[in-house]
Image (cartoon, rainbow, N blue to C red):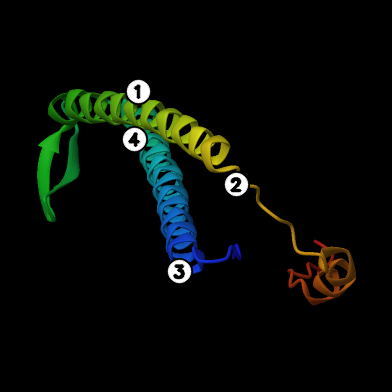
Amino acid sequence: MASKAGGDGKEAINEQVIANTYANMRTEMNQLYTKITELEMEVGEHSLVIGAIEPLDPSRRCYRMIGGVLVERTIKEVLPAVKRNKEGLEEVIARMHEALERKKKEITEFELKYKIRIRKADNDAEEGGKKEGTAQGVLVGPAGQ
């Protein structure tokens, strides 16, 4: 913290407020990343469903989960709804990407305004070898056994 004669307490509070605000902004950005990833996975699932049921007979029965209830419908009824849902998800993802870009810009401006720099830990080089040895993986044997 800054140590100035007479203004110590106020300077410390301001630095803490700035640090908390910055941390909150970074948290919001990470939450946006997480939600975008989650929605992109749902779009992928919708694409798989569309790909699976599109070539089938439109009068064939299929089941769809609506609000936690499994409902029996025909492919002709379900396919347009799944496509609409996928398009809606893609629109939401596009808006969230825009919000993410705005948040990144806001964080960059905040960093410039308050001269914030992220410090890397000094002992990263020393811990590099240790981290490598503690990594867990999966050991796969030969395919023929």
Q: Nearer the viewer, mark 1 or mark 3?
A: 3
Query: Label 1 is placed on what type of residue?
Result: Pro
Residue holding disc 4: 46
Residue holding disc 3: 9
Q: Are marks 1 and 3 in contact (CB under 8 Å)?
A: no
Q: Which residue is drawn at 38% across and 40% down?
A: 45
The secondary element bearing badge 1 is classed as loop
Query: Label 2 is placed on what type of residue?
Result: Ile
Q: Nearer the viewer, mark 4 or mark 1?
A: 4
Residue 91 pos. (x, y %): 30, 24
Q: Which of marks 4 and 2 is in front?
A: 2
Q: Which residue is drawn at 85% across and 75% down?
A: 130
142 with respect to 35 (left or right):
right
Q: How far apart are marks 2 and 3 (CA)?
A: 20 Å
Q: Which of marks 2 and 3 is nearer the N terminus?
A: 3
Vertically, is 7 above or below 133?
above
Q: In which quarter of the image is the N terminus?
A: bottom right
Q: Which of marks 1 and 3 is nearer the N terminus?
A: 3
